[in-house]
């Protein structure tokens, strides 16, 4: 008796109003501009479309959520199952009473900062210096320049793997440094934030200062994924990387930035394997030099390629 042919996840999908692509390339959706394909890429039309899709999806099919790919590495073997990305339908911003502002999970953090500036609401300026969406910022409790998302979030709405909608308070989100306690299978769809009345010109000045610091301190005009490693307690990841002699280190087409050595750069031909191998090489050298085990801040998804990358070089 012949075995049944393996089915593609695309053969077992519920009907949607949004867009579904099979075997979709993901490299162009990440800032590293490298990596494999998604078996299925789903762009829901709205929250209800997302709920219906997840509620009707075979529970054995994996679901992975991505934003604009700013702090993301897609491995070369691709991502099995369904990749969900929330676009324009999830990019709304609405202002309420007492300085409250609601933003969809697909909203760019910088766009939220600009909208609050125009309404003379302070508190979100730091988001202008963090590339990515509100959803990604919530998932990792993103922070910079002395502030983080947990300082301003009031509550968030999420859809669970079964398609049910939940509203979680700040306490229920369980946020800590670059972490939240929400189950991995739950998808942020919006959040409410608390702004503080301020002066638009002063807010704009703070945002300009942040932009200037980014331009001077970070390699922002290259293919990079932002900060690679979390800062260990009491020190900075870049200082540990530098002290371990990793500034300028390379693997294939991947290189440690000379400007800020907590940033990895795709020089143009790097594979995701090159980038991940370089990151693991750095972790090993830092551990050997200082005894500190660095943790990845960049999110890595998907399956590795079959063939290994080469070793590091100068």
Image: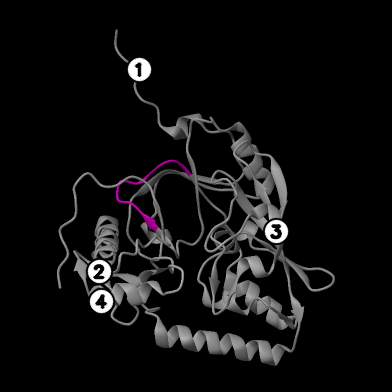
Does residue 308 show up?
A: yes
Please report whichever mark, 2 or 1, sits nearer to the chain's N-terminal start.
1
Frontmost residue, 9 versus 201: 201
Number of residues whose C-alpha sits closer than 10 Å to that of mark 3, classed few (under 14), some (14–19) or many (20 or more) = some
First of labels 4, 1 by sequence position: 1
10 Å crowding of disc 2: few (<14), some (14-19), many (20+)? some
* Displayed quadrant of residue 273: bottom left
Q: Main secondary structure of the magenta part?
A: strand
In space, the residues marked 2 and 1 are separated at their CA atoms by: 53 Å
Q: Quadrant of residue 106?
A: bottom right
- Residue matched to label 3: 170
| Residue 13 position (above or below residue 35) | above
Task: Look at the image and tell me in which quarter the N terminus lies.
Answer: top left
The answer to whether the residue labelled 3 contacts the one labelled 1, judged by CB atoms less than 8 Å apart, is: no
Viewer-nearest of labels 2 and 4?
Answer: 2
Residue labelled with disc 2: 289
Residue at mark 4: 247
Element class at badge 3: helix
Disc 4: CA contacts within 10 A as few (<14), some (14-19) or many (>=20): many
| Among the two numbered marks 3 and 2 on one chain, the one whose residue lies closer to the N terminus | 3
Residue interval drawn in magenta:
73-82
Q: Mark 3 to mark 1: distance in Å?
A: 48 Å
Q: Position of residue 191 (x, y in %)?
A: 69, 60
């Amino acid at each position: 008796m012949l075995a049944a042919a393996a089915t593609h996840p695309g053969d077992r999908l519920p009907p949607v109003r949004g867009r579904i692509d099979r075997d979709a390339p993901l490299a162009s959706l990440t800032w590293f501009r490298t990596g494999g394909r998604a078996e299925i890429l789903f762009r829901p039309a709205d929250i209800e479309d997302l709920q219906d899709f997840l509620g009707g999806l075979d529970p054995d099919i994996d679901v992975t959520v991505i934003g604009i790919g700013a702090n993301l590495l897609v491995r070369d073997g691709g991502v099995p199952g369904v990749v969900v990305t929330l676009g324009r339908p999830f990019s709304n911003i609405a202002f309420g009473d007492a300085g409250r502002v609601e933003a969809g999970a697909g909203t760019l953090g910088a766009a939220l900062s600009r909208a609050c500036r125009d309404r003379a609401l302070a508190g979100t300026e730091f988001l202008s210096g963090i590339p990515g969406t509100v959803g990604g910022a919530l998932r990792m409790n993103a922070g910079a320049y002395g502030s983080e998302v947990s300082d301003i979030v009031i509550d968030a709405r999420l859809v669970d793997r079964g398609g049910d909608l939940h509203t979680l308070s700040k306490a229920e989100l369980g946020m800590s440094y670059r972490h939240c306690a929400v189950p991995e299978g739950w998808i942020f769809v919006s959040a409410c934030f608390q702004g503080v009345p301020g002066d638009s010109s002063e807010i704009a000045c703070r945002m300009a200062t942040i932009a200037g610091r980014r331009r001077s301190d970070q390699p922002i005009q290259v293919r990079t994924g932002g900060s690679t490693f979390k800062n260990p307690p009491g020190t900075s990841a870049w200082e540990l990387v530098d002290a371990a002699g990793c500034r300028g280190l390379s693997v294939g087409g991947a290189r440690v930035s000379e400007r800020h050595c907590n940033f990895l750069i795709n020089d143009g031909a790097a594979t995701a394997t090159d980038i991940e191998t370089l990151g693991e090489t750095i972790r090993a050298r830092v551990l050997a030099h200082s005894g500190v085990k660095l943790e990845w801040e960049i999110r890595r998804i998907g399956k590795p390629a079959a063939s290994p990358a080469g070793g590091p070089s100068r």
